[in-house]
Image (spheres, grey):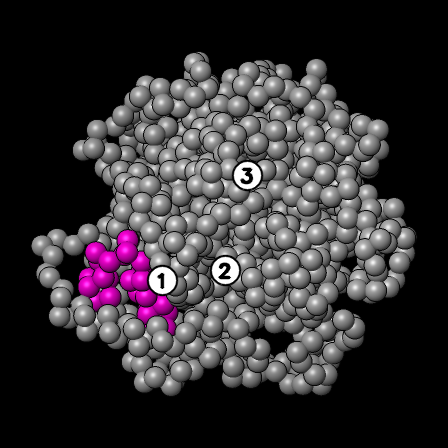
Amino acid sequence: MKDHTLKLKLKVWRQASSKTLGRFVEYEASEVSTHSSFLEMIDQVNEGLIKKGEEPITFDHDCREGICGSCGFMINGEAHGPLKGTTVCQLHMRNFKDGETLTIEPWRAQAFPIIKDLMVDRSAFDRIIAKGGYISVDTGNAPDANSLPVPKPDADDAFMSAACIACGACVASCKNASAMLFVSAKVNHLSLLPQGGVERPERVHSMVAQMDAEGFGACTSTGSCSASCPKEISLSNIAKLNRELLFSALTRRQAPSGDGV
Amino acid sequence: MTKLNGQVPSGSIEEIWNNHKFNLKLVNPANKRKHSVIVVGTGLAGASAAASLGELGYQVKAFCVHESPRRAHSVAAQGGINAAKNYKNDGDSVHRLFYDTVKGGDFRAREANVHRLAEISTTIIDQCVAQGVPFAREYGGLLANRSFGGAQVSRTFYARGQTGQQLLLGAYSSMMRQVEKKQVELLTRREMLDLVVIDGKARGIVVRNLLTGALESHVADAVVLATGGYSNVFFLSTNAMACAVTATWRAYKRGAFFANPCFTQIHPTCIPVSGELQSKLTLMSESLRNDGRVWVPKAKGDKRQASQIPDSERDYFLERIYPSFGNLAPRDVASRQAKFRIDEGHGVGPTGLAVYLDFRDAISRVGKKAIAEKYGNLFEMYEKITGENPYEMPMRIFPAPHYTMGGLWVDYNLMSTLPGLFVAGEANFSDHGANRLGASALMQGLADGYFVLPYTLGNYIAQKAKDNVTIDHPKFKEAEQNIRLQIQTMMKIKGSRTVDSIHKELGRIMWEYCGMSRSEQGLQKALKQIPELREKFWNDVQIPGSENDVNTELEKAGRVADFIELGELMCQDALERNESCGGHFREEYQTPDNEALRNDQNFCHVAAWEFKGEKEKAQRHIEDLNFENVKLASRSYK
């Protein structure tokens, strides 16, 4: 691939903390290599800011290979930018044109308060998982791994749902800031496996209740969540979640004391 | 110099762990809740330890630097996890996994630890399947396997190219279940900056709250460090950006010995560097070598496109040199051979710093669809980064720092030289010797956390006298004060160098002189340059912003300061180990056909370094290694 450089105009959301007002600040990014990733382009802008003694643009990031789920912000109104099935750390500058203006802003959702600049608090996701996003099995209790065959199509489907990286793009892209895609992916991953069957009615009930308590909005099936998902988690997860909820309402028994659920 | 004792119980190797588990002291269930344990790090080792200890009833506090424990870098492991299940009926056994791992580590690991790891491996798979980890399956519904380097059996379990992610989510969700039950208290966005030692025992940590900058003290009966490896000393590595040596380094400075720091793994198949501004390197899983063939053009400087070069003009060098293991030669060996070819002028691509990994033959044998099914996400990732389609042209790959076998010294119970300080996963040194085999890191992390620490840590707590130490103890105040001072000193420098620019300079020194090959002359040079760089850092670094706020530059600066010190110790360790073994290749010690030449007479031991003071030279201690079950022999994959 040919290497050439770009000059870009950036409009970046800067906000010192959740208690202060934010605003867009303009920066120029020049000599940007088309081989750089989007985050490396921001690194480059930050190097310039630091040398001037100014605070760099703060953003979450870690693995930079699209799997940890730390990074993510809106580029020109699109979560993780224009390329389908890609996190911003894997988005390379060859996808942009010389002279473009890019507007960069954090995920915006009531349940994801802004911490600083592009960094938001997504701990609501952890609290939802804590309410039942697991199979309750203590260490040391397991039978031989091959004692329970799982049909390959079920195992593959479970894997596709389990591929979610909890980046929050689905919430940020949704006009209602709904977390249904995130929750449904975990519910389906576990419901599809025989090991997860015992806790099915409780799991979906508790996780959805926590999702509501966190302040995420309702789902109106626009599909923007799945369209913006870097792992391309299917919208059909949400349909299945609704069936699981119905099934739960019909079959859930009040446990005298819950095991985490 | 003193001789360290690994505290391995006597007995036949097959029986040691079982007997030891019986001999370990227990804490009765009602008393467990009166004891507290700190676990630092929430990757595979940390999350599995926190979950398991919480289930047992201890009061656990789990710390991570990330916003969520699920972001830990174990998440990025691609290829798989080994286990001696022998589901393939291809001759695998606990003994064979043990043998392969000892040999793969070039006879520099402790036999008893490796055997225990091989024994536990099968239980890990059972545990993970019960948790709902969606491993790859065959059409009959049973688990699928593939092969990894350094093995002639198929014992690797996998979930496409996302095995680490799926295993981590299993451990993470088990831990979150304990968080919900209030057995585990989760403290995220906290960075451990000191270990507190009281009366010779590890009793707590001081962390910085990365959101507010506040320093917080935490006391416990025991501390577990599961904070990963230190490949980021090279700046460019496959590690995540936040991977650091800080937690283990600061424990080292409080008296825990650091073992074999020069044992680092350079992984052969990474996407080559494309430019000066690159921030990290991306691995292409070793599993690709099941079907991909590694080659370079026979002619030096051949600039033709890969497809234009006929087979007769290609050198499939791994298949040529190692006919019995072929493309699945272990990582250290494969990386070194790639380096030799590139040094000789056979490198490919625009920089000449790459070799080919070619799927042409596999695609014509089994079809594009079958290859996509196995490696689809890896191929996509490659295309995203390079803009090239690996179905049509071979991947270009180059070795890159990936894993560190060295780490804090631990005995058979995974306890460091400081009583009460346990170290798990990549952060310890114990199981992989001088080279780790593929798909064994996930196995070790989970073995330590799920199945070793719950026993050995209980044994320590059962024997520990109860006391009333709290965070009001002067040692906590002193530690906080030291950190505050260090942070203020760094903030006040206001020099001209960014943290990254200094880190990159360190990386270049380490890669050049302490990377894939090392020499006395080069290491001496590095030992002169690193202290100079340390001076530059402490006189000229620029950290904007405030220490009482989110300040990512300040976080990085603390980590880089530690990396600089570690780099010096790595070079010192490499210099004093006058032999080649595994990933440690000293140019002076090689066989006529360029293989690593060990010196078992003088170096069949672990080197464990003791911190003696800021300006003092660290002291080298040793632990002798005895090979009673695997014959000490020169390692051959031919």
- The verdict on residue A196 being magenta is yes
Q: Amino acid at mark 2?
A: Cys
Chain under callout 1: A
Q: Amino acid at mark 1?
A: Asp
Stretch of the chain drawn in magenta: A180-205
Q: Residue at x 69, y 19 (%)?
A: B600
* Residue annotated with mark 1: A154
Distance from Cα at disc 1 to Cα at disc 2? 25 Å
Q: Residue at x 51, y 37 (%)?
A: B90
Q: Position of residue B408 (x, y in %)?
A: 54, 32
Both on one chain, marks 3 and 2? no
- Report the mark closest to the observer, 1 or 2: 1
Asked whether residue B591 appears in the rendered view, the answer is yes
Q: Is residue B605 left or right of residue B304?
A: left
> Which class describes the residues within 10 Å of circle 2: few (<14), some (14-19), or many (20+)?
many
Chain under callout 2: A
SS class, disc 3: loop
Q: Residue at x 90, y 53 (%)?
A: B299
* Residue annotated with mark 3: B153
- Report the mark closest to the observer, 3 or 2: 3
User: What numbered label is drawn on residue B204?
Assistant: none
